[in-house]
Image (spheres, grey):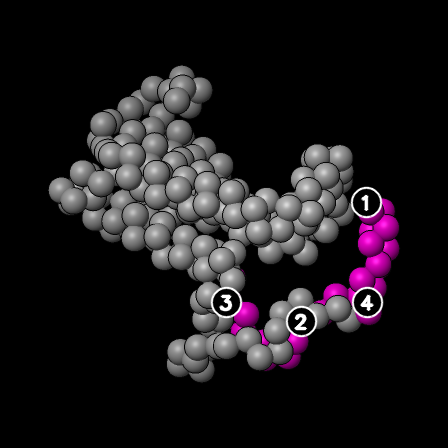
Amino acid sequence: LPLAASRPLSVSSYTSPAVGFLPTPSRKLRDNNLKMIDVGGVHFGSPEFATFSQTMFSIVNFVVLPFWAMMIAAPNNELTQKLMKSSIPILLGAAMHLALVVYGPTHDPAGALSELKLLGTQGFVQLTAMQEMRQFPDFVSEEWVHVLTWDLFVGRYVYLDGLEKKIPTWHSLFFTFFLGPLGLTMHFITRAIVTKEASSILKL
């Protein structure tokens, strides 16, 4: 989410049970000179393109948003249907994800190995270890593209299922965009109500 505060963000000192990591007190999380965009007095963070990871993080947001907007605002539009019935939207996200997966180990093998070790030994079972993973920009960017692509895949399913069964999907798509599984659940409930088939909640 955009950062509205102008003061630098910080976290207090703590010892991570996961790896014994001890950050410096008030460790800065963002650059003090972070560029902001002022829109009617509201400050929004501007896209970052200084590194490959930052660039991919910024680009993927602009890539997926038009597809969501088309599915929600213009579901019956011919272009919307043509695009979403194809695999193009998902392949775009997959291509960016692949680029990041390849980039990490090739530009910083030692760092990638550390990330993989922490994720494999602790990240899947300890929240503190996953919090620790946020110090790796390549990992954060890769996971963000991962999440947005999967969300779009689910949104595409909801949209196409709604078209096929003539079910309204704008509300389900809206919540899928923001809350993922809850939006998909909302679609299942909507489908059951519209089709008057309660058992359809348990079907994909």
Query: What percent of the width, then of the height, locates residue 183?
Result: 43, 39
- Local secondary structure at mark 2: loop
- Of labels 2 and 3, earlier in sequence is 2
**Disc sitting over residue 50 in the figure:** 3
Residue in the picture at 81% in, 45% down: 18
Tag in front: 2 or 3: 3
Q: How many angstroms separate mark 4 from mark 2 (CA)? A: 13 Å
Horizontal side of 67 relative to 186 (left or right) equals left
Q: How many angstroms separate mark 1 from mark 2 (CA)? A: 23 Å
Residue in the picture at 40% in, 81% down: 40
What is the quadrant of residue 188 in the picture? Answer: top left
Q: Main secondary structure of the magenta part?
A: loop
Q: Amino acid at mark 4?
A: Thr
Q: Residue furthest bottom?
A: 41
Horizontal side of 84 relative to 52 (left or right) equals left
Q: Residues within 10 Å of mark 3 (few under 14, many from 20)?
A: few
Q: Amino acid at mark 2?
A: Leu
- Find disc 1 in the rendering and name its residue: 18
- Of labels 4 and 2, earlier in sequence is 2
Query: What percent of the width, then of the height, locates residue 166?
Result: 22, 31
Instruction: Inspect the magenta stretch and tell me whether residue 2 lies in it.
Output: yes
Q: How many angstroms separate mark 2 from mark 3 (CA)? A: 20 Å
- Of labels 1 and 3, earlier in sequence is 1
Q: Amino acid at mark 3?
A: Ala
Query: What percent of the width, then of the height, locates residue 153?
Result: 38, 36
In the image, which residues are magenta? 1-25
